[in-house]
Amino acid sequence: MTTIAFIGLGNMGMGMAVNLAKAGHEVRAFDINDAARASAAQQGCVDAGTLKSAVADADIVVTMLPAGRHVSMVYGDEGGIFSHAKAGALFIDSSTIDVTTARKVINEATHLGYRMIDAPVSGGVAGAAAGTLTFMCGGTDEAYAAAKAYLDIMGKNVFHAGAAGNGQVAKIANNMLLGIHMIGTCEAFNLAEKLGLDAQTFYDISSTASGQNWSMTSYCPAPGPVPSAPSNKDYKPGFAAAMMLKDLRLAKDAAESANASTPMGLRAAELYELMEKGGHDGLDFSGIMKLIKGELG
Ligand code: NAD
């Protein structure tokens, strides 16, 4: 049994922490939200009460926080993880954050003698609860090897993408591509329908032709062809448009810092920004179909 501190018990973190506890580890759970800590305690974790008591005796600290500024603060601020963790502890940050902050925090951890990886995930809330997430990791071989057994409990596919920050690189490049092909898929279905071709027939053809892609076959934005897709539940998320926009903004910043041309990624961000401005970013990201069809105000 390993003592694991888990910080950030939100939509994703809760399921991940509970899965570590179910696997027999002592999970000392902390969140600034009292109700989240109470819920974790009901599901087999220990309510640590404070960040300090969560971290002090932990061999491993996992963080699952909203954005880069939270990660910087929770690790580096006075009274943060770096102030309280024991020597030799291993840190796993699974939050989706900007590459620059990820590299900065890992460098600082390494400088202080800790091991740390960035390990953002895909697979959503359902994957977190089921323990079927995909982890994309960045960090040294040694830190990755030490983390792997624990990532295997929370996930189904675990990849080592290279040095510190490369997990975040994989995540934002993948999600930029996802945003782009989702919009392209919406445009294609809308065009076909306007020209008199129904969604199912277009799906049957395109899903076996060169337009085939994940947004079409697993998550079809046109209602009908893929029964489990959010398009059949009035675009209830799923993966909210707001979260897609967050990832597209991270991709935009990263592209600027690397001097990489991403014209389609930028355009995808602009379209998701329209959903945000109209107050529709709580819809699933495939709900951008409604924007393309001119159905959003
Ligand atoms: P969330 O907002 O539901 O959870 C974040 C939790 O962190 C909250 O419970 C919040 O109270 C807690 N928190 C914030 N500041 C804190 C602090 N200083 N100390 C302790 N706890 C603090 O977010 P989420 O949906 O669980 O997402 C977490 C991360 O995972 C994000 O970076 C997100 O981009 C990424 N992600 C989310 C999804 C998804 O489908 N929700 C999918 C993949 C990746």
Image (tube, rainbow, N blue to C red):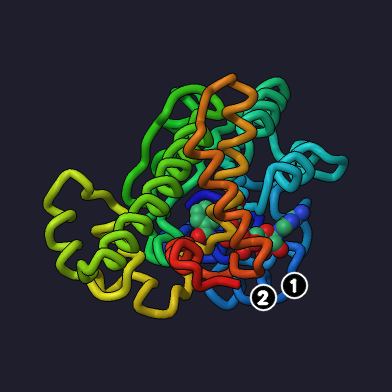
Q: Label 1 belongs to which residue? A: 34
The residue sitting at the right extreme is: 78
Left or right of 203, for residue 190: right
The residue sitting at the front extreme is: 195
The location of residue 14, given as percent across then percent down, is 55, 65
Indicate the secondary structure of the residue bearing disc 2.
Answer: helix
Q: Is residue 17 visible?
A: no
Q: Quadrant of residue 80?
A: top right
Which is nearer the eye, 175 or 220?
A: 220
Q: Quadrant of residue 106?
A: top right
Task: Name above or below for residue 137 compared with residue 39.
Answer: above
Which label sits on residue 283? none
Few, some or many C-alpha atoms within 10 Å of disc 2 (few <14, some 14-19, many ≥20)? Answer: some
Q: Quadrant of ligand 1?
A: bottom right
Task: Name above or below for residue 55 compared with residue 233.
Answer: above
How far is the residue under mark 2 from the one under mark 1? Answer: 6 Å
The location of residue 98, given as percent across then percent down, is 63, 37
Q: Label 2 belongs to which residue? A: 38
Residue drawn at x 32%, y 68% as measured from the top left: 222
- Residue type beneath disc 1: Asp
